[in-house]
Image (spheres, rainbow, N blue to C red):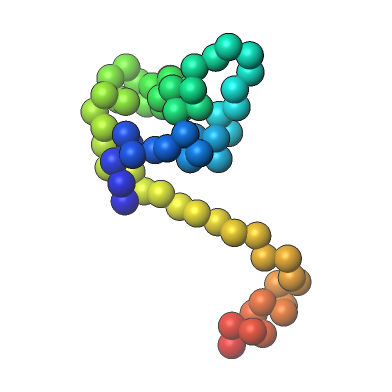
Amino acid sequence: MERLYDISEEDAEAEGMELVGDQPSPRDLFSALWESINGQGSWDANPWVWTLSFGVIEKNVDAVLREAA
């Protein structure tokens, strides 16, 4: 878990915030999106949030399960 304000520019980009032209930073775009979803003042509340990371496994699922056994 981490505080919402701990999101980095790179994390915001990984969340899909892409700069087009002369826009604010990816983090600023993320904060605007957060407020649009969670309501006015939700960014300023700086809540604790779960952070999840995923990786790509380029194998068939049966091979992964066999290796895990």
At x 65%, y 60%, the residue is: 56
State the image coordinates of residue 55 (x, y, percent, origin top left).
59, 59
Query: Residue 28 sits in which quadrant?
Result: top left
Does residue 33 appear anywhere in the picture?
no
At x 55%, y 35%, the residue is: 13
Q: Residue furthest left?
A: 45
Q: Is residue 59 left or right of residue 31?
A: right
* Near-viewer residue (68 or 24): 24
State the image coordinates of residue 47 (x, y, percent, origin top left).
26, 36
State the image coordinates of residue 45 (x, y, percent, origin top left).
24, 28
Say above or below: 16 vs 53.
above
Q: Residue furthest top?
A: 22
Quadrant of the image for the C terminus?
A: bottom right
At x 72%, y 78%, the residue is: 62
At x 74%, y 70%, the residue is: 59
Query: Residue 39 sits in which quadrant?
Result: top left
